Amino acid sequence: MRCDRLAEEPISRLALRYVTEESKKEATRPERSTRLPRLLVPLAAKVCRESVYLPLLTEQLALRPGMRILELGSRDGAIAIELAKAEPAASVVALEPDSASLVEARKRGEAEGVFIEWVDALPTAAGFLEASFDRILSVRFFHRLDPALKWETLDRLYALLKPGGELHLVDWGKPENFAYRVGFLGVQLVEGIEKTQDHLEGNLGALLRAAGFKDVEKTHTIGTAFGTLELMKGRRAD
């Protein structure tokens, strides 16, 4: 863990408390990848304005033939499938730690006629080779991890990226106004105050920089009924 960078970044007290001792413990799989019933996942995608951020994310990823892409927390597989369609000559790996969701995602991918490698594991235990991905993306996934697992996951993702490879996140950020703050209370009640505290404080970019990512940038913000979503990207040094 690259803890020496913490002194250089405005990390929350919550994250700082966990990055030292707790992050050294073995990562544990969440009891469920999401607390939402699987039937409500498509509805959540609509409320969270997936149709707005998905084109922005796809453009931001700048996929090219031959690239290897990893998606964390694929849920029903909708985003992995869209990426496979957008660049059929790229290799897409979709990781989802909830086995039942992964079964449904695999069936959906087969019905859409795209080839995706589906993996039932956390990124800290998936067995991928280091420096083996050009792009890694995570959509509304990081807020579901406890602070210790966030740190271990970011550390692992940095290692999985090729030099110059990029991490792209879509997740909750600091609410832009009072209405979004009220909406975000719903997310906190479902996922837990502790897991979402860094998101509430707007520390997502600082977490990436502390994990070693360069050129960290918030590219877009999108208001939703549940709060403010941020599109963030960072790069592994060449």
Image (cartoon, rainbow, N blue to C red):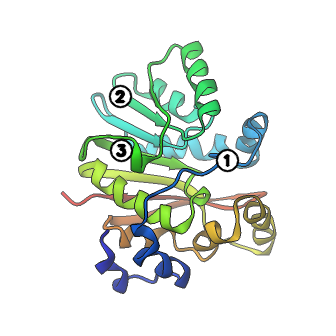
Q: Quadrant of residue 92?
A: top left
First-in-chain label (1 vs 2): 1
Is the residue 204 above or below the residue 39 in the image? below
Q: Quadrant of the C terminus?
A: bottom left
Circle 3 residues within 10 Å: few <14, some 14–19, many ≥20: many
Q: Which residue is the site of mark 3? A: 135
User: In this rendering, would 89 be left or right of 219?
Assistant: left
Looking at the picture, tell me which residue is in the foreground, 220 or 95: 95
Give the numbered dot on residue 91: 2
Q: Which residue lies furthest to the front in this view?
A: 26
Q: Quadrant of the N terminus?
A: bottom left
Q: Which residue is the site of mark 1? A: 34
Q: Distance between the residues labelled 2 and 3?
A: 10 Å
Which residue is depicted at the point 53% across and 27% down? 81
Q: Nearer the viewer, mark 1 or mark 2?
A: 1
Q: Distance between the residues labelled 3 and 1?
A: 23 Å
User: In this rendering, would 153 be left or right of 8?
Assistant: right
Residue type at numbered disc 1: Thr
* Element marked by disc 2: strand
Which residue is depicted at the point 42% across and 76% down? 21
